[in-house]
Amino acid sequence: MKNIYIISLLLLWLLQTATMTAQTSADSQMNQAQELLEKREYHAARSLFYKAYCAFAADGRYDKATLCGVKSASTLHRENKFKEAFDMLRAVDEMIMNCEKSLQHSRPDLRYATVKERMLIYTRLKQAPRAKEQLARMESLAQAAANDSISGDLLYTQANLYYTFGMTGQGDAAISRLISKYKDAKQYDKLLSCYQSLIDFARKGGNAAMTARAYEQYIIWKDSVRVLHAKDELAALQKDCRAKQTIIEEKDSSLAARMYVIVFLCVVCAILAVALILGGIVLLRYVLLTRKQKKALEVAEENNGQKSEFIRNISAQMSPTLSLLDAKEPAVKALKDFVSHIEELSEMERQLAEPFETQETRLATFCENLAAKMEGKLHGGVKMVVNAPKLSIPLNAPMVERILLHLLENAAIYTPANGKVTLEYKRRGAHTHQFLVTDTGCGIDASKHSSIFKPFSEVRDLTKGDGLGLPICALLATRMNGTLSVDAEYVKGARFVLEIHA
């Protein structure tokens, strides 16, 4: 019995020693990776950051695991390996999700780091709309985290993004918010540190516009401080003179004058006390309101997840029953299609932030193949016209084909005999592409131009279509960094415009 006890203690000691060794090894790898990163040896640093990430994640040290995972993604995007960087960030997000499940509460501070890295990648790619989307997510996460360090970093990041895309006014506003809390409190040492950090941040990020603007405001502030100091010294001197004069007057004044001063000071103190009480009440209401808004945001996110899960559960429960019915019946087929479209719509909303991969596609061949697939679907005498140049552009061909085929099939339905359906391509900029599907049918009422892209906007007979095709196409366009809309100026039928920013 004594031997068993000794062996158990020995095994426990060996397990603790192994755990401490693994933790020390992971910390050492992280420190070595940081040193290599400062020397710009990105490949070696990335390898060590990834090993440290795996070790920290396995040990449940999620804060350091997130830091190492984001650093690994950062070294990838420095070398223009954007796909690998996005893959790394997705892996870190999955780890954070597991962390939240195990802790049973959200970690917006960890998610902030991965969203910020995505924003930096989109900024590097000059994709302003996607970068702004990530910045909006950063603002929500910073508010949820309620962390002063994250709030300050958000303002630095906002200024950097706005100056990068030439939005000087908004960049100035971000800098003003950053320094106002120190400036109003006259905390000049902290304000000086803030300006220096802002300039260093801009220099390290290679943002010349932000560096120049920050330095210009720093010079203006420094000059104003000198003037302010001079005013303070003058005010102090005037105050000292008034104090001496008051002492002289008090010595020569009567008892009534002294009582008047005492009463006046008491009134001032009472006013200040009331002001402090009112300020405390306002501050308390603000704190309570902030907590209420934070709780409301958490409830909204939870309800959205429950909604998607509810839709998937309903669809899964309906499928076995529908499979027992006659699939040839129009109503049964309509219900099956409706269930399938609901599941797809829910899945698309969940994956909206994930971009599609693209590859070079020859436009002329792509559009001609679409026209070939429309043979036999047009009414008698309807002419199909394709206008596409012989050039190649980066596209996710399957997703674009799905959207355009849906638009062409709708055009075929509503275009009468001897009409015309047109598919054409137009280039609107270096990275902006437009596909236009035009028909000579009855057109679409102007009041429905926005509602046709919203699911469940009206009660429909499912045997005549569930109306979810266009909402699904609109979500696909959004995932490709684009939009799907109706040309309101075209009145000889209907014209849909698919615009993609690549």
Image (cartoon, rainbow, N blue to C red):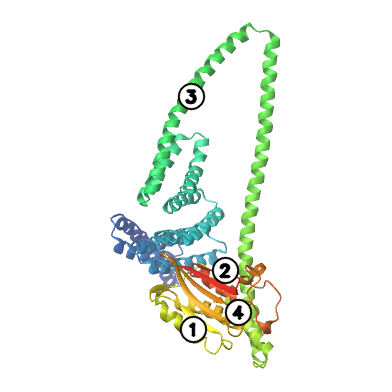
Residue 371 is marked as 1
Q: How many marks?
A: 4
Residue 341 is marked as 4
* Residue marked by disc 3: 231
Q: Earlier in the sequence, mark 1 or mark 4?
A: 4
How far apart, in angstroms, are the residues tagged by discs 4 and 2? 26 Å
Q: Is residue 351 visible?
A: no
Residue 145, given in percent of the width and then of the height, sits at 54, 54
Residue 469, given in percent of the width and then of the height, sits at 59, 77
Proximity of marks 4 and 2: CB atoms separated by less than 8 Å: no
Side of 277 where 421 appears, left or right: left
Other-residue count near label 2 (Cα within 10 Å), few / some / many at <14 / 14–19 / ≥20: some
Label 1 SS: helix
Other-residue count near label 3 (Cα within 10 Å), few / some / many at <14 / 14–19 / ≥20: few
Proximity of marks 2 and 1: CB atoms separated by less than 8 Å: no
Q: Nearer the viewer, mark 1 or mark 4?
A: 1
Label 4 SS: helix
* Residue marked by disc 2: 487
